[in-house]
């Protein structure tokens, strides 16, 4: 921890900018991870409940299901496909931001490290003598920022993969519901059958 605080104290504006940027990334990652996971989990439970009622032969979709809006349309097949596309977009929202954080955080840390190393070499150029005892602590301080970038990237990548999997599971449930609805409705009745909500 001492190396971290000494880096901030000695690093100047670049160090503050890099750590602020990485801190915002880290906070955003945790917030997105928790909020999206809870939302997807709740949505999946609702869709599973609707799927179970369809499997029991009851053409009843919960109002909270995304498919409930589609069943009010006359053209069932087309509206179900559109609803699936809307569900996919909604389920995978914020995943691209997590991907950006996971891929850019190490580079932001590397940028801070390079600036610190350049500053160290500039100071060494003004000194009368340079030895390993002077260079080693400065380099180790500079590497703290790279470690911070990697520290931020790991949870962002993990959150991205876990949320992507959760979205896939949710979309699988929705796809099964769609297949059951299409199978239960003969082609001649595709636009006329009404479902309960």
Image: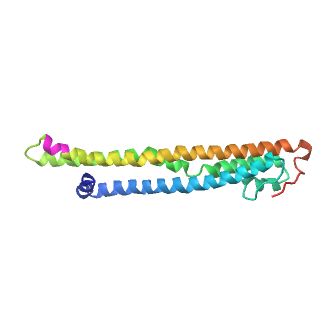
Q: Is 56 one of the magenta-colored residues?
A: no
* Residue 28: image location, x then y, percent: 47, 56
Tell how many labels: 0
What's drawn in magenta, residue-wise? 132-136
Work out whether residue 178 can be spotted.
yes
* Residue 34: image location, x then y, percent: 53, 55
Work out whether residue 108 can be spotted.
no
37 relative to 177 in the view: left or right: left
Q: Nearer the viewer, residue 149 or 179?
A: 179
Q: Please tell me which residue is depicted at 92% across the width and 44% down the height of the picture.
A: 188
* Residue 82: image location, x then y, percent: 74, 48
142 relative to 86 in the view: left or right: left
90 relative to 102 in the view: left or right: right
Q: Please tell me which residue is depicted at 87% across the width and 46% down the height of the picture.
A: 190
* Residue 109: image location, x then y, percent: 35, 47
Q: Please tell me which residue is depicted at 89% across the width and 51% down the height of the picture.
A: 193
Predominant SS along the magenta part: helix
Q: Please tell me which residue is depicted at 51% across the width and 50% down the height of the picture.
A: 97
Q: Nearer the viewer, residue 62 or 110?
A: 62
Q: Nearer the viewer, residue 90 or 51?
A: 51
């Amino acid at each position: 921890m001492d190396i971290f605080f000494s880096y901030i104290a000695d690093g100047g504006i670049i160090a503050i900018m890099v750590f602020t940027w990485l801190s915002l990334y880290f906070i955003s990652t945790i917030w997105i991870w928790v909020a999206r996971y809870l939302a997807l989990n709740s949505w999946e439970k609702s869709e599973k409940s609707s799927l179970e009622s369809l499997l029991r032969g009851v053409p009843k979709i919960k109002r909270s299901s995304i498919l409930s809006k589609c069943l009010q349309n006359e053209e069932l097949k087309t509206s179900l496909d559109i609803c699936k596309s809307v569900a996919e977009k909604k389920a995978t929202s914020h995943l691209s931001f997590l991907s950006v954080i996971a891929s850019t955080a190490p580079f932001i840390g590397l940028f801070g490290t390079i600036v610190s190393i350049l500053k160290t070499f500039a100071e060494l150029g003004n000194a009368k003598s340079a030895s390993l005892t002077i260079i080693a602590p400065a380099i180790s301080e500079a590497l703290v920022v790279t470690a911070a970038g990697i520290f931020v990237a790991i949870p962002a990548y993990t959150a991205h993969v876990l949320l992507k999997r959760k979205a896939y599971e949710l979309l699988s449930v929705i796809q099964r519901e769609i297949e059951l609805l299409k199978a239960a409705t003969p082609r001649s009745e595709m636009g006329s059958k009404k479902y309960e909500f």
